[in-house]
Image (cartoon, rainbow, N blue to C red):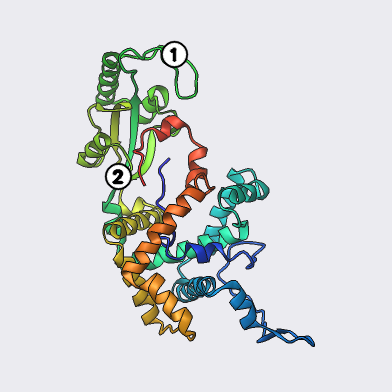
Amino acid sequence: MKKKLAPIILGLGLVSLAACSNDGEENTDSASTEEGDVEFGSVLATSDAGDVTADDVLNQIGTNQVANQTFQLVLDKVLTDKYSEELNMDELNEQIDAEIEQYGGEENFAMMLQQSQPGMTVDTYKQQRVSNALNDLYFADYFEITDEEAFDSVRKSSHILVSFAEEGEEDAESAEGEEDEAAMTKEEAKTKADDLKKQLDDGADFGELASENSDDTGSAQQNGELGYVSKGQMVEEFETALFELEPGEISEPVESQFGYHIILNEDVSLEDTPKEELDTIKTQLVNQKIQEDPSQALQGYRDLLEEYNVSFENEEIQSYIEETFLNADEALENAQQEDAAAEEESEGAPTEENAEEESESEESADTEEDSE
């Protein structure tokens, strides 16, 4: 139901072109961090008319594209060395396979990739997911985000939604074009919400009441569960009430644009929270920090290259990378331009986020605030 924020490497637009241009690198079985073993040599072809060298091919591709790809590969190589033991490839491949299945198989997934991002292949998408996962691990470490900090920033919640129609709209068509069945007025919804809260106070089971009464049909199928909620994901009224609740406490009916919410702040501990969920929360916190000060990400890359004594032997590539990726003003300006272009091209692109969302109802999505 909730959207996971875009991985930082793509959110900044720093190396998205490099990542998407890797069409020739194939990995037919699964995502992998291993490099190929092809030795091309300096001379690729000979003839009476002259030789074709690796430099000829690279010049044909263009310095900018070569530099983009070089920077991406350096990052992948360095981050793989740094985090290969922490990255669970089996788990990541399972996630990717599940996403592909949600879109009806690899053939359908490939078609949607082509429609949303021409040139993007399934193999490239898999490689991109590995790069994103490595960057997530690095920046969580770089900003020293602990499990405790991640856990303290969220609440695991459930809710019961009692919706109502605005005055004069009781018989209006729903978003799906169907007639609402006996849409309640605001007063009727408040009365029902108060009655449900009284039943809860008297010992009724929250999950049972949610599954039987909640108008958020997506979460109702899960006994009202919304999972881990961080700030900025829900409408303001919902968020304010949730973060004021004590663990295990249930709110009074809270009015929002969607109706009346009865909110449960579930009593969970850090030990109850899956590592995958903590990693997702850390990525969200990283994005928040970088949105506040994008230059921090650039400094993170500079520190990483310095840690691994990275040097670019070609002066033109060195100059391009410094200006494009490592100089704050230049890099951020390029990032904004690339983000704007990527947003237009990739609208509706199949990702793990919208794959999850498509499997749920629009009513469930309505409890979230449109953001990011």
Q: Which residue is mark 1?
A: 181
User: Amino acid under label 2?
Assistant: Gly
Q: Which mark is residue 232?
A: 2
Residue at screen point 36% across, 47% down: 372
Vertical side of 37 occupied by 166: above or below: above
Residue at (50%, 71%) from the top-left corner?
68
Could you classify mark 1 by the number of other residues whose Cα lies within 10 Å: few (under 14), some (14-19), or many (20 or more)?
A: few
In the rendered image, the quadrant that contains the N terminus is top left
Q: Secondary structure at mark 2?
A: loop
Examine the rendered structure and indicate whether residue 190 appears above or below residue 242: above
**Residue at 41% across / 49% down in the picture?**
4
Up-down relation of residue 176 to residue 94 (above or below): above
Q: Decide which of 157, 359 is in the foreground and name it.
A: 359
Examine the rendered structure and indicate whether residue 36 appears above or below residue 231.
below
Left or right: 63 with respect to 333? right
**Picture quarter containing residue 298?**
bottom left
Query: Going from the N terminus, do you reach mark 2 or mark 1 first?
Result: 1
Q: Position of residue 80 (x, y in %)?
A: 49, 73
Residue type at mark 1 is: Glu
Going by the image, does 46 lie left or right of 287? right
Q: Which mark is residue 332?
A: none
On the rendered structure, is 190 left or right of 181? left
Q: Secondary structure at mark 1?
A: loop
Task: Please provide percent x and percent y for residue 310.
Answer: 43, 83
Looking at this view, is 195 or 58 the one in front? 58
